[in-house]
């Protein structure tokens, strides 16, 4: 299986299945001498952790990161940072029912087709458990990028939408409620909606908005590795993501060039920011903002009909402890992936300078 | 500058500025023994070419591809395919006015900031002229993937939208009109709209829908290089793209899991296809469909105010010959990038098999 | 720090310092369904382990590999194989004396210059302890390549040379003595020599010969990634290696083309094999053989003069438990790196075939 | 075919067959603002060119490099530098005799086995003509690395050896004779030997010594991408190379550690330099020196027996115009590859610094 790494110079490689002994990864390229606050890393892990509130899955995972290398006397040494997270709560029996049958809209079927063989427990490698490793990588990247502001928040759950521009929102409120929507009123409505959906054994989709501030001018590699292209790939690689847009996004389609163009101020900043902080694939110093669409979680706590390996129809029943809506826990993942993208482009950019 | 390559095994690397002597590239990894129809390659080039209709830029470029290696006696040899496209129409003087000033929502400013120096003629490396090389790469990939159906079409121009599912559309009509919208009535309305916008010296955005059919099950590398993540990056790397969604996309956000899940038929196909032909990052054999949002072209034929290198305000006037709407010419680019993504994943997938 | 990975499709990435909590790695790209004999992996580890005989370092390391992912019910799943090896014997105090001074011909000085900061305990990342991870990767690669014969042996220690062609040697005797020279008489002489050198607190160099048999025709990527170029890089990346030659090597320089050319038999094999099993960078089905030169270990158990961080002269004294000659323990490392090279080229080669 | 690129940040990708329309390449990552002396590039080309003296092949190739992008107003722009070299002298008929038969110790047989199909004219992609592109890439790298001294010279032809240390040689004499041996007396003997060998229709091997001076401390990425490992790969990827050693090399094997260790001076330089300017894979500021072994050219102007595609014995006769000894023309290639290695590591090193 290819595709376990993200980044060129600042690079995260991950391993692990949801119900194996451990998941983990290697962070390469973090420059030496960066002070690492291990508690800050764990705080990011806790934002993604199951069981953190009443509206997320009630699985219990300690999700404690153990660093094995690359940090010495509290600072990065420049060598690869290896880490593991043990899978403390492996209720594999919950998954016996899917050993030979395929859950709809999961990766069970395609893994069997592609690899001929799969670790069926809890989705194995295709499980979103893998994203815990991304949060570790992102937490290290954030500490390398201390001067940047990297934030994400829930802006939509089902049809409940936060109708404010990010500029008019107090981003310090993101973690003030379990939904991670920084508008308390909207957050409450979202929370209610998630509870209702869960009662039905059903699930619902959502949108996360990302805002990257204080990004230096010049990050991004034009042509194929444009900053927003890499950012889009980063987001689309997160489980359940169906769409990505930045700046004016899909709404920009209906605008005319004369409205959409961002006129310059004399300092190089722009009066408007439909560009979303990126021009020609390179950051221009303005805020980078983007939206990420998440589909409703595929695992329902309902009976359903599906097929087994031989193509026979079988009756199945969703079990286990699952998220009714993925976006509250996905906020730190979006931030982590954004941090990884920026850290990598920052290192690439540095190589230009004598 | 990094980021001039796309793909791991089937790989395109490009070079060239819009007003240099030539642009070109190298296609690596195309398996040996593939018959190459050079006229088919040129036909793809002609679909992207300036001057092909009244609603696109009237620049004249011969856009003739010259292959220099890798093809012998009409077939690929397995060695890298080098090619060049000479820039026949280099009206560099058209660009003297932007030598020292920055066009809004172009890459002029960020290139100067990042590289300290730029080839200012026609956008240089940031020009969409580079995409001609992608069309060459895609045309070769398409011939390698002869059994697949790779199509894209214009589904929106400004607010004029093709309100049909792709299944209800005759894709053979894509090239039947200059807009490349396969619904003649909608195409006519789009064409009118583009003409109006051009009269005003203005521009307008649009959406291209891609449909990939007969894709074998199993393509895509889970985790970071999911099929749709790489496809998204491919599309977002095209000039002027602001958003990407596949399958249910942003609309899937408001659905419940019980509606959104794609129930299996006994042959492994699914009754619905909200997944968009990809599950867990791997193709499942169903049609892959996606939408790509393009912003309005930034070059207007209007006077505007901007700044020069020293930050002084300057008056400028858009000149040259530009597209009022980019989507008609971007259709072959979207197809080319999709073909490159699929060709690469097909080769990666093959490496699994003894 | 870049450069922690080896391979393109079959890829090993390692992390870890000699005296941190653990070292480990991730093996990517191993095809699914390969049965893994964990005891065979451990046997390879034991061949490299300190303390295995009287002529190697007497450090004690359990060197037990713990696999964390990618193997399920005894077989590879195709997903990345994560593993760790805990550092059980971290006598860090042995290294306090080098905290602020630089050992001659070690990496201490250049690490401080490059990274500004280093984990000085036992050489940190520059320690040959990292090669334990290579042996794990190679052991998995060997199991994937079960039909190939991958062997290495000690052919020289100081001036004591095994004067036989590999064809005249019984390779099954490699592990019959602690030196890993398959000629018992020469092995005894080498062992005596190593003991003498150790008594003096000194060290001595050596040569390892590698022989790769049953390699299919067609492996290797011409031009920059020639089979022997990648093999050479693999060997030169092992600690203490100073030279690599294959086939006729440096001796081929004095031959004429008419002697050196390998005439064909009718089945495509060749009558002689000065080419060393590789032509134009691609395996031709003949035995691949090569020689790897190792310098004498730099750590002596003798007093020496050196400098500290400020450039002051200091007196120092080699301590700890070190190898008087590295080649006996390096044999499994050479085999491991060869296996990694072949596994990667085999996967790359497969991608050519429909 | 993979393997057409060399380098990570400063990267050369090449294409082209010896008798196709053109060969060429793309140089990526050269920082912007470097002044490019095109005549200096051509001088390097002329050092490698056929027909330059009486002791090399008498083929005539103009070998004129045409740059197509990435250089503007005499300076690099930071964008990829595309270039082509037209094949002016394509005597393809010279090669009809090898269309269906395999020349011994060439790549003909393995290409047919690997790709099933080959451009048989003059070796196609396996021809050393590809190295002309390396010289272009190296010439650009040299201009980026103006402050470094990158030299190579012929130190052995057959058994005729230059018995002087490089420190005792006047490197400015390298190009003073057609052999490129900076010792006039030895050069004369070498030249005589090459003439004799050629009279017999035979060929002879040789050794090139490389010396890299003024290399900053800190270049190289430890573990797998050690400076000398990448340098070794670079050299082994040159056609006809059979071995590589650096510093004490194979001779270091017989030394004791107490002799071999390089004691420090107080400024961090070392009293001796058996390390060859590299410790732990990182440059230490001392001279880097290495030796590269070239086999005798496989093409003889003699009759020989071989096999055809069906395995039948056939009589053949070497034709065409070939080099009796490859080393005089290989000197600029060795320098070019060394420059590419150093340029890449310099850029990687820069990314560490804020």
Image (spheres, coloured by chain):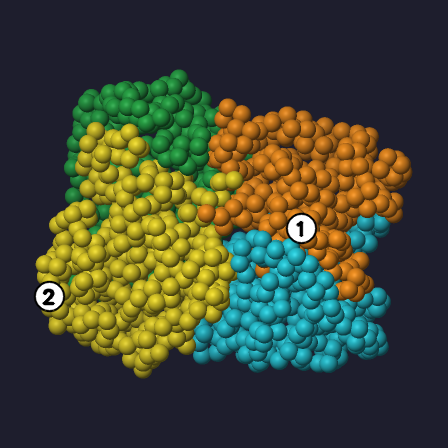
Chain colours: A green, B yellow, C orange, D cyan
Of badges 2 and 1, the one in the foreground is 1
Is residue D259 positioned above or below A73 on the image?
A: below
Which image quarter: residue B175? Answer: bottom left
Residue D254 pos. (x, y %): 85, 49
Subunit of label 2: B
**Dot 1 corresponds to which residue?**
C267
Mark 1: few/some/many CA within 10 Å (<14, 14-19, 20+) = few
- The answer, for residue C30, to whether it is visible in the render is yes
Subunit of label 1: C
Horizontal side of residue A175 vs C63, given as left or right: left
Is residue B273 positioned above or below D103 on the image?
A: above
Do marks 2 and 1 share a subunit?
no
Is residue B272 positioned above or below B187 on the image?
A: above
Badge 2 element: helix
Badge 1 element: loop
Residue C351 pos. (x, y %): 49, 48
C255 or D306: nearer the viewer: D306
Disc assigned to residue B192: 2
Residue B191 pos. (x, y %): 13, 65
Residue drawn at x 19%, y 48% as measured from the top left: B166
């Amino acid at each position: 299986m290819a595709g376990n790494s993200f980044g060129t110079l600042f690079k995260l490689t991950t391993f692990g299945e949801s119900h194996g002994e451990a998941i983990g990864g290697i962070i390469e390229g973090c420059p030496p001498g960066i002070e690492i606050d291990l508690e800050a890393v764990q705080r990011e892990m806790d934002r993604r952790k199951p069981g953190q509130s009443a509206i997320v899955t009630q699985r219990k995972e300690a999700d404690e990161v153990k660093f094995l290398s690359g940090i010495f006397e509290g600072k990065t040494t420049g060598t690869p940072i290896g880490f593991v997270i043990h899978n403390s709560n492996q209720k594999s029996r919950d998954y016996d029912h899917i050993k030979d049958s395929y859950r709809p809209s999961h990766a069970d079927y395609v893994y069997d087709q592609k690899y001929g063989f799969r670790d069926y427990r809890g989705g194995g490698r295709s499980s979103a458990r893998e994203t815990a490793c991304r949060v570790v990588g992102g937490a290290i990247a954030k500490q390398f990028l201390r001067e940047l502001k990297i934030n994400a928040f829930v802006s939509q759950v089902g049809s409940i939408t936060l109708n404010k521009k990010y500029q008019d929102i107090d981003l310090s409120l993101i973690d003030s409620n379990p939904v991670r929507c920084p508008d308390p009123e909207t957050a409450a409505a979202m929370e209610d909606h998630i509870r209702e959906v869960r009662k039905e054994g059903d699930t619902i989709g959502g949108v996360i908005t990302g805002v990257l501030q204080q990004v230096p001018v010049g990050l991004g590699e034009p042509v194929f590795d444009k900053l927003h292209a890499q950012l889009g790939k980063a987001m689309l690689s997160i489980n359940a993501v169906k769409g990505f847009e930045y700046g004016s996004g899909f709404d920009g389609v209906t605008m005319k060039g004369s409205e959409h163009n961002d006129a310059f101020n004399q300092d190089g900043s722009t009066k408007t920011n439909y560009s979303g902080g990126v021009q020609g694939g390179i950051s221009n110093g303005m805020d980078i903002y983007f939206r990420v669409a998440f589909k409703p979680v595929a695992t329902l706590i309902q009976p359903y009909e599906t097929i087994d390996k031989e193509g026979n129809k079988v009756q199945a029943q969703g079990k286990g402890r699952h998220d009714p809506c993925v976006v509250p826990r996905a906020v730190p993942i979006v931030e982590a992936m954004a941090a990884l993208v920026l850290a990598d482009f920052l290192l690439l950019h540095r190589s230009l300078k004598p």
